[in-house]
Structures are given as C-alpha cells and as structure tokens.
Image (spheres, grey):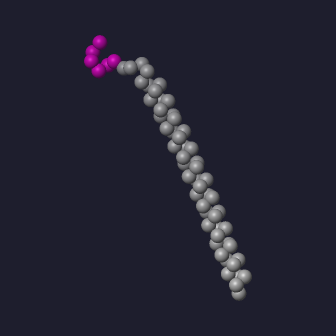
Amino acid sequence: MPTGTFRWPCCRPRWRASYLTGLSGSARIMQLRATARKHRRADRRAVKAEAKDSSKARR
C-alpha cells in the first residue's frame, strides 16, 4: 500500500457529526440572538412610550 493513500475508516463520520453539531449550535445561537434583539427593541419602544406619557402628565 503506497504511503499517503490510507484513510482511517472512522474519520469521516466523526467529522460529519462534529460539523452537524456545530452547524445546529450556530443556528440555535443565531435564533437566540434574533429573539434577544426583538425583545430589546420592544423594551426600547416601551421606555420611549412611558417617557412620552410622563412628559404629557407634567404639562
């Protein structure tokens, strides 16, 4: 058998499994970041609306 042509039979499945795990982990992180962004935006709107209401009450 020439040098360099031998491949470990177990390397591909491990690589695929780690790739799929990393891919699904990345997708979950992106989903969580998007949700956090949405909630921050809603909180900012609520604070702005509250500040607007309180400024009307002072007049």
Q: Is residue 45 magenta?
A: no
Count of numbered labels shown in the rendering: 0
Q: Give x and y (percent) for residue 1.
A: 29, 12
Outermost residue to the bottom: 59
Residue shown at the point (49%, 38%) measured from the top left = 22
Quarter the C terminus occupies: bottom right
Q: Residue at x 64, y 64 (%)?
A: 43
**Residue 30: percent from left, percent from top:** 55, 48
Q: Residue furthest toward the right?
A: 57
Q: Position of residue 36 (x, y in %)?
A: 59, 55
Residue found farthest to the left: 3
Residue 5: within the magenta? yes
Q: Residue furthest top?
A: 1
Q: Identify the residue at horizontal 61%, vertical 63% (top origin).
A: 41
Residue 59 left/right relative to 37: right
Q: Would you place residue 14 above or below residue 44 in this image?
A: above
Q: Quadrant of residue 47?
A: bottom right
The main secondary structure of the magenta stretch is loop
In the depicted structure, whether residue 18 falls above or below residue 26? above
Which residue lies at the image location 54% right of the left edge and 39% below the top edge? Answer: 24
Residue 15 at x, y percent in the picture: 44, 29
Q: Is residue 12 above or below residue 34?
A: above
Q: Is 7 above or below relative to 48?
A: above
Dividing the picture into quadrants, the one containing residue 39 is bottom right
Camera-nearest residue between 27 and 48: 48
From which residue to which does the magenta span run?
Answer: 1-6
